[in-house]
Structures are given as structure tokens and as C-alpha cells.
């Protein structure tokens, strides 16, 4: 599977610049501070770098705030966040890259306030911003959030939307307040999860996140920056209806287990949503028909689809079949899930046919 950074380069090769119709070369550049941490945030930062470098740019990036260096990749080598690394690669001064453990630290707060920022932009920063922080930038703090707020407030909006099987999602640009993702919405863009995107999602589970967050979010931000800086955005921003809010809590490893008592559509949505991390797992019983001995195996379920050919008389309630190159597992409500790709612990991923051949005549059953 391609890494996030590779997919960003492949699908998000674009350059966004601010509109010259709203910015004049004689305007004093506004001081903008960017807050973000992962690779998708680095791509938003790159768009801001490109826009700020334009001769008629309205703003300059005064500082960057990101998560502290941490152990990443094999060997757990301590490395800067993707945002920090990207900023350094672009030649941004290292002394203007701040990495507080918490945004409320006194030393950081003092240094941040001395910058006199006019606007802060957050994109998957990963830290709670206290009131004393939010009170500093004169034009406020705005956040790019990959959902149609007030839907899917929280840490995992795209994954939860996919898990719910929604037909439409999008990205919102909203003012940041102390309540999670609850600030007034400046603007939003919608995207329909049509059949073409669904096909991509089977193989590239993060692509919808990248499209919605990087391309749509970056363009939306650059488009709205003039109105944010001149203050008119505060007059058009719409308060969110809290009664319509839904939550998108952070995904935990414990959620990765599949229960085949659920409907196959629910399980298929979960496989797609969790494909990037933490993946989905299941346990099946392996039975040797020659002696009746059985054992339990744990599988990582990588790709699936809904099986449309099941009838109650075709399959026993707990039997797992192999047909037309896939495992067919009976699920709740008379549905069935086709498993196309599987991975055993410590092994490489294989297609269902290779896995079935490796059983050498043994039978599979649901627990």
C-alpha cells in the first residue's frame, strides 16, 4: 500500500495562490501562524508557503507550531513531525518552529504572544488550544476540518463517516472555540462519495482524506483568507446547530475486531474505514476433518465486499465457504461478507485463494 506522502504527491500535485483581485502589492503582509503535525498538515502548509511567496501575497508565515519530535518509523528513531520537517526542508527558520508539549505552557505562551500573530490556522495539530492562546491572534484562529460541521466533530471524521456509510462528506473552515470543532463555520465544500471514489477507497483507504483535507481544505482556506483578514468573515460565519452535531471520536485498537453477528454492510464499511489504521481483525475456527481437531486463528481482514449470492439454504450458519476466489462468511440478518485479501500474524498479505490453498483441506467456521 502506498504511503500517505506518496499518495499526496500523486493525487494532490497542485499550486494554490491567492487572488490578485483581493490583494495589492502595497498591502502590509499579515502575520499568520500555522499549527499542524502529520503529513496531510504538511501539505496544507506547503500550499500556504506557495501562496505567501506570491508577489501580491496578503500574508507571511510568521511561525509554525507542531507536535514535539517523536519516535517514528522502524527503529523508533526520534524525528521531527512531518510539518516541522517540511518547514525545515523549505528553509523555514528553525527558531520559529515551536514544539510545546501543551499549547498552554508558559514559556511557549510568552514567545507566541511576542510574535503578535494576526491569524492562526490549524490543520490536524493534535493539541488542545487554551483560551489564553485563542485570545492572542487579533483575527482569531481558524481550523480546516474534514467533515460538514456540525457532523463528525472530533479526531476521526473521515473514518467515522466511512464507517457509517454516508453518501456525502466534505471539508469545513471554521473559527476555533474552546468547545471541540464547534465554532462558527466560515465556509464548506461538499463531496459525494460516488462509485468511483468507492473503488479508490478499496485500495487507497486514505485517498478520500487526502482529497478532502488537502485539496479542498487548502483551496477553501486560500479563498477565504482575504475575508478573514479584513474581518468580514466574522459577519458571515454561521453558528453551528449543536442539536445536529455528531461525534467522531478517536479510533482505538480495540475497535478493530469484527463480529460476524453484525450485518455484512456494517462490517464492510468498517474494513474500509479502518484500513489505514488500526486495520480490522477476526478470529475463525480451523477444523481438521480427518481427526476432528480444531484451533483458532487470528486474521487481519484487508479488503472485502458484500456477497450478493447467499441464500439461507446455501450455507450453514457458521460455515465459511470459498467461492470464486474469495472467502464467504455468513453475517447477521442473512447477509454475507466476501473476504478478498487476508494477512496472518507475522506474514505478508495474500489473496483469499492463496490462504484457502494453505489450509490443505481443513475447514473454516465462525466462532
Image (cartoon, grey):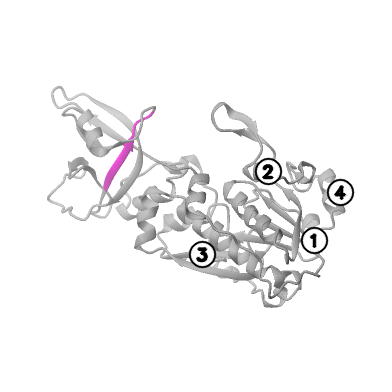
Camera-nearest residue between 72 and 277: 72
Residue that carries the numbered disc 2 in the rendered image = 84
Q: Nearer the viewer, mark 2 or mark 4?
A: 2
Tags 2 and 1 in contact by the CB under 8 Å rule?
no
Q: Main secondary structure of the magenta part?
A: strand
Q: Which mark, residue 281?
A: none
Q: Can residue 329 be seen in this view?
A: yes
Question: Disc number at residue 170?
Answer: 3
Q: Is mark 3 on a helix, strand or loop?
A: strand
The x and y percentages for residue 299 are 34, 35
Distance CA(mark 2)–CA(mark 4):
21 Å
Q: Which residue is drawn at 28% across and 43% down?
A: 340
Report the quarter where the C terminus lies.
top left
Among the two numbered marks 3 and 4 on one chain, the one whose residue lies closer to the N terminus? 4
Of pointers 2 and 1, the one earlier in the residue sequence: 2
- Horizontal relation, residue 299 to residue 140: left or right: left
Hey, which quadrant is residue 200 in on the image?
Answer: bottom left
Amino acid at each position: 500500500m502506498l504511503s500517505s506522502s506518496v499518495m499526496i504527491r500523486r493525487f494532490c500535485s497542485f499550486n494554490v495562490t491567492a487572488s490578485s483581485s483581493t490583494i495589492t502589492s502595497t498591502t502590509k503582509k499579515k502575520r499568520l501562524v500555522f499549527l499542524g503535525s502529520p503529513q496531510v498538515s504538511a501539505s496544507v502548509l506547503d500550499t500556504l508557503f506557495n501562496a505567501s511567496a506570491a508577489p501580491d501575497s496578503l500574508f507571511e508565515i510568521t511561525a509554525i507550531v507542531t507536535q514535539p519530535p517523536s519516535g517514528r518509523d522502524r527503529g523508533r528513531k526520534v524525528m521531527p513531525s512531518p510539518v516541522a520537517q517540511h518547514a525545515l526542508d523549505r528553509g523555514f527558520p528553525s527558531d520559529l518552529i515551536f514544539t510545546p508539549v501543551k499549547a498552554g505552557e508558559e514559556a511557549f505562551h510568552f514567545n507566541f504572544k511576542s510574535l503578535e500573530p494576526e491569524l492562526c490556522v490549524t490543520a490536524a495539530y493534535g493539541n488542545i488550544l487554551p483560551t489564553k492562546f485563542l485570545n492572542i491572534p487579533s483575527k482569531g484562529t481558524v481550523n480546516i476540518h474534514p467533515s460538514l460541521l456540525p457532523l463528525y466533530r472530533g479526531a476521526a471524521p473521515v473514518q467515522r463517516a466511512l464507517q457509517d456509510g454516508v453518501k456525502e462528506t466534505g471539508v469545513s473552515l471554521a473559527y476555533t472555540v474552546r468547545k471541540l470543532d464547534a465554532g462558527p463555520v466560515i465556509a464548506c465544500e461538499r463531496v459525494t462519495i460516488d462509485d468511483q471514489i468507492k473503488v479508490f477507497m478499496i485500495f487507497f483507504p486514505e485517498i478520500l482524506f487526502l482529497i478532502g483535507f488537502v485539496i479542498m481544505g487548502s483551496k477553501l482556506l486560500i479563498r477565504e483568507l482575504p475575508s478573514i483578514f479584513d474581518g468580514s468573515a466574522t459577519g458571515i460565519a454561521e453558528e453551528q446547530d449543536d442539536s445536529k452535531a455528531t461525534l467522531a471520536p478517536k479510533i482505538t485498537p480495540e475497535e478493530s475486531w469484527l463480529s460476524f453477528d453484525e450485518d455484512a454492510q456494517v462490517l464492510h464499511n468498517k474494513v474500509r474505514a479502518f484500513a489505514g489504521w488500526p486495520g480490522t481483525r477476526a478470529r475463525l475456527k480451523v477444523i481438521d476433518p480427518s481427526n476432528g481437531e480444531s484451533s483458532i486463528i487470528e486474521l487481519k481482514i484487508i479488503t472485502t465486499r458484500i456477497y450478493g449470492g447467499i441464500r439461507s439454504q446455501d450455507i450453514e450458519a457458521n460455515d465459511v465457504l470459498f467461492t470464486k476466489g474469495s472467502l464467504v462468511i455468513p453475517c447477521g440478518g442473512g447477509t454475507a461478507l466476501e473476504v478478498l485479501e487476508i494477512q496472518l500474524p507475522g506474514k505478508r498479505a495474500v489473496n483469499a485463494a492463496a490462504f484457502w490453498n494453505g489450509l490443505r483441506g481443513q475447514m473454516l467456521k465462525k466462532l
